[in-house]
């Protein structure tokens, strides 16, 4: 991940220039204004100067350029007005970002807009800006600082990179629109968030800077939070086949035709959640024609395809298994019907432009943990608790070795093998970094106990986990002493209004709380149906970031003409 950045803004004075081969960097220079000054593209400049490919420029650097002239232009990025009615609370012991979003009914997206440097200001006694109405309604005995009555202003051009895959969602994003103007309908778009930079955006979507600028000339005046950028022109839109109703096929492995029951409970559970989502959208006025197909098992799958009429199908959700997904994509390739894979995620699938992959892969989690470790690393030994296959641990180790200088990394099979380091100068015990790369609950319990024990022996232990395990919720106080940071997915925020509504509706319908696959069934189907417009053009809405009952959906293109892959997850930080 690119850590440094540049912005296409600031106060820039362009003067007439004579022909020259090089340029000496002065204060305020960016790759964009240098390329404009010399009549070249940013991509050409970066090609000739590999050392600035990440936007890093130092005053006095000499970069290779071409000749050209330019006229004087002066622009300055205005501040973004976030809110006119806000107040401040004083951070108390054990309060976390996640806890604040739950208590004050605010999404982390909005919380971060009000507090751009939130992660670096999470110490006891710090002031956190919140909507004044939320403080009055939900604050209780929370200490309040002086009320802010004037607009809160933030300047986006100097904000650090803040990858949007690190937010905790309360569900507010599910109502956001990806295309707010009709003249943007033929483009995939992106809503710029606080902390985004041009480099983070082009890296995220796999486009060049010049392509981005060509589609968004207004970038020459600066990158601002709230801007809607055109990313690429969409392929010819998929349009509904017949009438007003959206024809949807659910392919689930019941196995009735083969008398194999291995996946039947999983499929049945998935269907209960899916039915709730279908009824919810139908009651809101969406016209739906739903067909459920028994996809059998992997061996018999192809015979189930005869139940699908590709000439009268608008959306297919399922099947569950990778080999079946490929068979289905080959079967529907001439119609380019949108296909949603709830569980399959493999590079073999990334070449299909009509495929939507729901499952966030483990490498995405590992990359985020590596980034988090790098931000706090200070010559500590690093231990990674692996699972039996060690795939996650090995990938994480490789990522850390590339990004953390002189990292001493040990992969262990159990948390019991994590040992304190020893200071060579004083002989005293020294803290270490412990990482959990195993999603087993019992291993997670042992990891929690070990980290807590080490934290009692020496201060400064840092703990991280690619996964959320039950012990993290049970031992918040103790684990906060190790500043535990973990990634969370498929977990319900039971205090959210939307979540309460869905859980109540499910219990009323089925007389029980939803199981794991029921939650996934609801989330996947509800997310897809809410992205469909009246013409069935789901890909025009695919760039919206939405959080359903327990899953965050944030789709990006795997490649220029490839599948859409979900990169959504949430980050939980426990603060001492």
Image: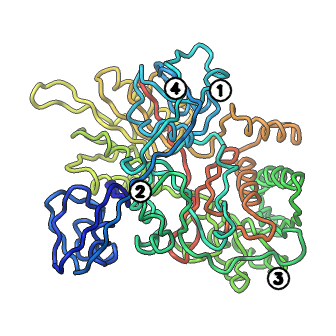
First of labels 3, 2 by sequence position: 2
Give me the C-alpha separation between circle 3 and circle 2.
43 Å
Residue at 35% over, 65% down: 73
Q: How far across and how far down the image is residue 537, in percent?
A: 73, 70
Give me the C-alpha separation between circle 2 and circle 1.
32 Å
First of labels 3, 1 by sequence position: 1
Few, some or many residues within 10 Å of mark 2 (<14, 14–19, 20+): many
Which of the 4 quarters of the picture holds residue 98? Answer: top right
Give me the C-alpha separation between circle 2 and circle 4.
28 Å
Pointer 2 residue: 197
3 or 4: mark nearer the eye: 4
Pointer 1 residue: 133
Give me the C-alpha separation between circle 3 and circle 1.
52 Å
Is residue 443 found left or right of 496 in the rendered image? left
First of labels 2, 4 by sequence position: 4
Q: Which mark is residue 148?
A: 4
Residue at 52% over, 58% down: 361
Q: Quick one: SS at disc 1?
A: helix
């Amino acid at each position: 991940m690119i850590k440094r950045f540049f912005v296409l803004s600031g106060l820039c004075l362009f003067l007439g220039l004579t022909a020259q081969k090089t340029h000496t960097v002065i204060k305020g220079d960016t790759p964009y204004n240098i390329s404009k000054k010399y009549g070249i593209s940013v991509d050409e400049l970066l090609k000739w100067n590999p050392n600035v490919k990440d936007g890093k420029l130092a005053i006095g650097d000499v970069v290779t350029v071409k000749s050209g002239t330019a006229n004087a232009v002066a622009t300055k990025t205005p501040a973004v007005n976030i809110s006119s009615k806000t107040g401040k609370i004083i951070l108390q012991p054990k309060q976390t970002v996640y806890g604040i979003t739950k208590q004050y009914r605010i999404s982390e997206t909005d919380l971060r807009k009000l507090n751009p440097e939130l992660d670096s200001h999470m110490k006891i006694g710090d002031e956190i800006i919140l909507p004044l109405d939320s403080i009055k309604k939900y604050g209780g005995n929370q200490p309040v600082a002086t009320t802010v009555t004037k607009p809160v202003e933030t300047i986006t051009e100097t904000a650090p990179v803040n990858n949007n895959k690190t937010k905790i969602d309360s569900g507010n994003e599910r109502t956001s629109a990806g295309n707010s103007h009709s003249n943007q309908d033929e483009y995939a778009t992106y809503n710029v968030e606080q902390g985004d930079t041009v480099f983070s955006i082009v890296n995220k979507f796999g486009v060049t800077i010049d392509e981005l600028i060509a589609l968004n000339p207004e970038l020459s005046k600066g990158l601002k939070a709230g801007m809607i950028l055109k990313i690429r022109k969409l392929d010819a839109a998929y349009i509904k086949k017949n009438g007003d109703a959206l024809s949807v096929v659910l392919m689930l492995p019941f196995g009735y035709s083969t008398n194999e029951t291995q996946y039947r409970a999983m499929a049945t559970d998935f269907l209960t959640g899916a039915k709730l989502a279908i009824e919810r959208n139908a009651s809101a006025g969406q016209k739906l024609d739903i067909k459920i197909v028994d996809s059998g098992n992997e061996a018999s799958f192809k015979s189930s395809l005869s139940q699908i009429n590709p000439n009268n199908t608008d959306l297919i959700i399922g099947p569950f298994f990778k080999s079946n997904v490929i068979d289905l994509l080959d079967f529907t390739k001439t119609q380019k019907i949108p296909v949603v894979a709830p569980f399959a995620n493999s590079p073999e699938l990334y070449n299909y432009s009509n495929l939507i992959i729901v499952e966030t892969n483990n490498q995405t989690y590992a990359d985020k943990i590596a980034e988090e470790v790098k931000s706090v690393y200070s010559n500590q030994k690093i231990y990674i608790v692996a699972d039996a296959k060690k795939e996650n641990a090995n990938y994480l180790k490789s990522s850390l070795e590339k990004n953390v200088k002189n990292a001493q990394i040990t992969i262990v099979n159990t948390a019991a093998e994590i040992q304190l380091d020893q200071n060579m100068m004083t002989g005293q015990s020294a803290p270490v970094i412990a990482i959990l790369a195993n999603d087993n609950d019992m291993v997670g319990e042992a990891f929690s106990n070990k980290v807590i024990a080490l934290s009692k022996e020496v201060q400064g232990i840092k703990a991280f986990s690619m996964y959320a395990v039950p012990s993290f919720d049970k031992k918040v106080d103790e684990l906060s002493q190790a500043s535990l940071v973990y990634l969370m997915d498929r977990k319900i925020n039971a205090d959210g209004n939307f979540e309460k509504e869905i859980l109540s509706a499910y219990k009323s319908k089925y007389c029980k709380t939803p199981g794991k696959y029921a939650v996934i069934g609801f989330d996947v189907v509800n997310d897809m149906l809410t992205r469909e417009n009246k013409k069935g053009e789901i890909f025009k809405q695919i760039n919206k970031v939405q959080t359903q009952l327990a899953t965050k959906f944030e789709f990006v293109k795997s490649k220029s003409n490839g599948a859409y892959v979900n990169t959504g997850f949430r980050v939980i930080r426990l603060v001492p």
